[in-house]
């Protein structure tokens, strides 16, 4: 897997999840919003993992 080299991992995670664009993170949302998005991503990923284990 290739990692993002020019973008912080936190920002790359939010943008690649499509919860916000880079422009939105720069102009509309603040740091607190970014951490909220990261929590949403983490919880969604965890829940998906649990669902995948229970359905296997």
Image: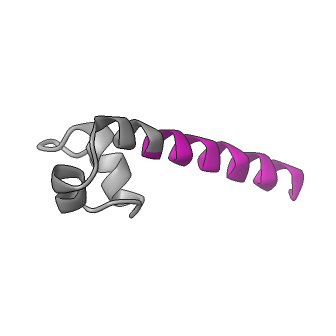
Q: Does residue 25 appear left or right of residue 56 in this picture?
A: left
Asked if residue 2 is among those painted magenta in the image, a careful observer would answer no
Residue 29 x, y percent position in the rendering:
28, 50
**Residue that appears at 46% across and 40% down:** 36
Say whether residue 1 is visible. no
Quadrant in the picture for residue 7? top left
Residue 11 x, y percent position in the rendering:
27, 44
**Residue that appears at 27% across and 42% down:** 30
For the C terminus, give its image quadrant: bottom right
Asked if residue 51 is among those painted magenta in the image, a careful observer would answer yes
Farthest residue in the left direction?
6
Image mark count: 0
Residue 23 x, y percent position in the rendering:
17, 61
Colour setting: one colour
Front residue of this view, candidates 36 and 18: 36
Say whether residue 47 is visible. yes
Q: Is residue 23 shown above or below 50?
A: below
Residue 21 x, y percent position in the rendering:
27, 62
Q: Does residue 1 appear left or right of residue 5 in this picture?
A: right
Q: Does residue 44 appear left or right of residue 47 in this picture?
A: left
Magenta region, residue range: 37-56
Quadrant in the picture for residue 46? top right
Predominant SS of the magenta segment: helix
**Residue that appears at 42% across and 59% down:** 17
């Amino acid at each position: 897997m290739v990692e993002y080299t020019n973008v912080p991992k936190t920002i790359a995670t939010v943008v690649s999840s499509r919860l916000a664009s880079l422009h939105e993170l720069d102009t509309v949302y603040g740091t607190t919003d970014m951490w909220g998005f990261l929590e949403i991503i983490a919880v969604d990923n965890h829940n998906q993992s649990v669902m995948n284990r229970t359905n296997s």
